[in-house]
């Protein structure tokens, strides 16, 4: 992790340690408008690193672009994939990195039909906090033909380095910052809401980082050019997903998977979908382990009610979680973004088939999200 | 980090990935009495790993034993140092690991006169939580001829693996558990008490782990055979010193250095010395950055007094810190362990000469510790 102002200008010398030719992978035109593209290209050239480029990564990154990247890398003899952007770009880069040395169809990895035996190294310059992908060994890709959004992971995919310059985030549209904040909070909650007992140290670390996100997120939306607030948020996003908050506990990624079903069909931003699915998921499951959700309400959101009424404490915790999302300008119900129940059955059956969650539970949670 | 019950029985197969012949390095007879020695030897033999051994590491590990270890490893063609014990054993193992391939005197590294260019790999089986040394790149050794206790560090010294089985700690004398708890808390405080602004995420992570230590430490002394409490404490000790709580901030290791002067002369346990030095250090420096010590009192020790009186909040925080030490059976004043002011000048001049802290400040802090 190379963190701080102007650190992106080191990219050439850092890449040089791993490769002489890279694929420069990015999304839309924003990195060209902001001047970042020119600075990255200048740094690569100064270090004598050759590159080819592939832009056009969209939110919910597509398998077709991954195929295009794999072809390009093979043809050009690329040795490292440099992702410049947010989670979508990094996830797409990881898919390409696995696909280049693989004889079969790269989607196999996402269908859990194969595990990568090798991969090109991936490096990143992060422009959206909360991806988590900058420090994680995971990738999520959408197969636009089948409308399935699946994840894959391998230690081979953890970036060899990631450059985090908080100042690069300031040109992001505000709704993308909000989505990022929702996503990083979810990365912690999926680990925090566990049935594993005796995880006090990591519980308290999770709570600390969640409190920091809840405190700094809304402040960031008010003071969007604050380097210091971006630094807090960007580091929180890294810690949230680097694995350190999940050690020793069973994690539950059901909310993420339920959101993936949603964004695969409706193409809504992941962070928006999570702000809708997570409160509904909590409402549906909290009775099974109320103590954990009481702990969440009290320690993360300072809910101060008589312990005798656990349900009221949990309900107030959910209300404050929703208030946090709203303070970022995020929706917390499907109906707010014009989605009704017509695809619930399709999504619930898919989740049931994948073994994520039984059909009836999935239906109940989606209904609570209406 | 290989964590959990019976994990020490994997040591042979783990070592085999790095070496065919190891130095088995340990302290006194406790690992023989507990049966751990036999289990480790059996695991090494099962994996076909040859070994020579060197016991006798004492608290405040000595340079002379390090020299002995270096000679032995060279003569026997040892390829990895396996430390079985606590921080002293691991620190001694790291010193040997640096010394084996070095032509000069290994103490050079501690005098900051050289940096190691190579080192044998070190692996550990931890039997005392809070060493921190199991995940850190640092080592502290006492030169018994000059009565100097100095630290050295290099990325080469980070153990290639560490085995943490909380059940192994249960045979420790209780005073050693108390020393460990004091040491791990100090490892966090030395990072937490910083002047670097805008470190909210790591502040809250530090606070979370400190709260966990303060909550679980005294419980552990009451329920000394609780695997679950040992697991919390052992993981807290690892997190406290693996570097993750210090990112992005200037750290201050003055209390550690002041304690090293003390234990180099009086040979008191490090954790005991820290429980004495740290409250005195806080009293001396808190006026320079009161907000940080208010934050400590409020967030770690739940001090709830009118914000108008910062000094009272800080004083109550220090009182609760001392109460925590006392609840573990630790002293908080030099006079409690029969030390008076006769060596203050020697120690203060040494600290001044090393550039750690000016003479007059060191004298003032030692006096506050009487």
Image (tube, coloured by chain):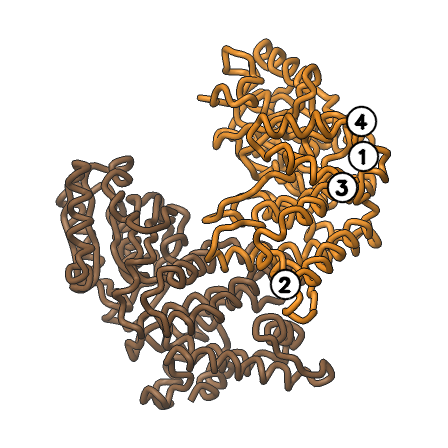
Chain colours: A brown, B orange
Q: Is residue B4 visible?
A: no
Q: Is residue A26 left or right of residue B256?
A: left
Subunit bearing disc 3 = B
> SS at mark 4?
loop
> Which of marks 3 and 1 precedes in the sequence?
1
Dot placed on the residue nearer the N-terminal end, 2 or 4: 4
Label 4 to label 3: alpha-carbon separation:
34 Å
Q: Badge 4, how many Cα within 10 Å: few under 14, some, many 20+?
A: few
Marks 1, 3 in one chain = yes
Question: Mark 1 falls within which chain?
Answer: B
Task: Specify which label sits upstream in the sequence, 1 or 2.
Answer: 1
Q: Please name the residue that numbered disc 2 is placed on.
A: B299
| Residue nearest the viewer, comparing A72 with A330 | A330
Residue A24, how many percent across, how many down? 19, 50
Closest to the observer: A29 or A67?
A29
- How packed mark 2 is, by other alpha carbons closer than 10 Å (few <14, some 14-19, many 20 or more), is some
Q: Name the outermost residue toward the front.
A: B360
Q: Secondary structure at mark 1?
A: loop
| Residue A173 x %, y % | 27, 71
* Distance of label 1 from label 4 (alpha carbons): 9 Å
Q: Chain of mark 2?
A: B
What separation in Å lies between label 1 and label 3 (alpha carbons)? Answer: 37 Å
Q: Nearer the viewer, mark 2 or mark 3?
A: 3
Residue B369 is tagged as: 3
Q: Quadrant of the C terminus of chain A?
A: bottom left
> As drawn, is A85 to the left or to the right of B289?
left
Instruction: Judge if badges 1 and 4 mark residues of a common chain.
Output: yes
> Callout 3: 10 Å neighbours few (<14), some, many (20+)?
many
For the residues labelled 2 and 4, say whether their Cβ atoms are less than 8 Å apart. no
User: What's the mark number on residue B29?
Assistant: 4
């Amino acid at each position: 992790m190379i963190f701080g102002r102007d650190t992106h200008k080191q990219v050439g010398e850092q890449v040089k340690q791993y490769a002489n030719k890279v694929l420069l992978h990015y999304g839309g035109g924003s990195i060209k408008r902001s001047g970042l593209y020119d600075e990255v290209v200048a740094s690569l050239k100064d270090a004598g690193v050759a590159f080819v480029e592939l832009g056009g990564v969209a939110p919910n990154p597509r398998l077709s672009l991954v195929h295009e990247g794999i072809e390009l890398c093979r043809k050009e003899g690329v040795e490292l994939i440099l992702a410049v952007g947010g989670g979508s770009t990094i996830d797409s880069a990881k898919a390409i990195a696995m696909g280049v040395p693989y004889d079969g169809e790269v989607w196999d990895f996402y269908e859990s039909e194969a595990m990568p035996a090798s991969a090109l190294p991936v490096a990143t310059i992060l422009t959206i906090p909360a991806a988590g992908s900058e420090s994680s060994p995971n990738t999520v890709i959408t197969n636009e033909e089948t409308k399935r959004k699946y994840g894959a992971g391998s230690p081979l995919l953890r970036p060899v380095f990631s450059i985090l310059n908080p100042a690069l985030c300031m040109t992001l549209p505000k709704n993308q910052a909000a989505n990022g904040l929702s996503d990083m909070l979810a990365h912690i909650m999926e680990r925090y809401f566990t049935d594993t007992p005796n995880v006090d140290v990591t519980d308290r670390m999770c709570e600390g980082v969640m409190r920091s996100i809840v405190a700094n997120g809304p402040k960031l939306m008010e003071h969007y050019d604050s380097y210091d607030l971006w630094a807090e948020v960007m580091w929180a996003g890294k810690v949230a997903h680097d694995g350190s908050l999940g050690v020793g506990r069973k994690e539950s990624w059901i909310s993420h998977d339920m959101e993936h079903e949603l964004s695969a069909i409706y193409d809504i931003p992941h962070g928006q979908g999570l702000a809708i699915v997570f409160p509904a998921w909590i409402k549906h499951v909290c009775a099974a382990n109320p103590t954990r959700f009481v702990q969440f309400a009290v320690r993360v959101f300072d809910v101060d009610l008589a312990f005798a009424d656990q349900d009221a404490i949990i309900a107030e915790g959910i209300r404050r979680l929703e208030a946090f999302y709203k303070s970022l300008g995020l929706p917390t119900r499907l109906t707010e973004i014009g989605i009704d129940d017509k695809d619930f059955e399709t999504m619930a059956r898919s989740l049931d088939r994948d073994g994520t969650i039984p059909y009836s539970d999935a239906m109940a949670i989606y209904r609570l999200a209406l």
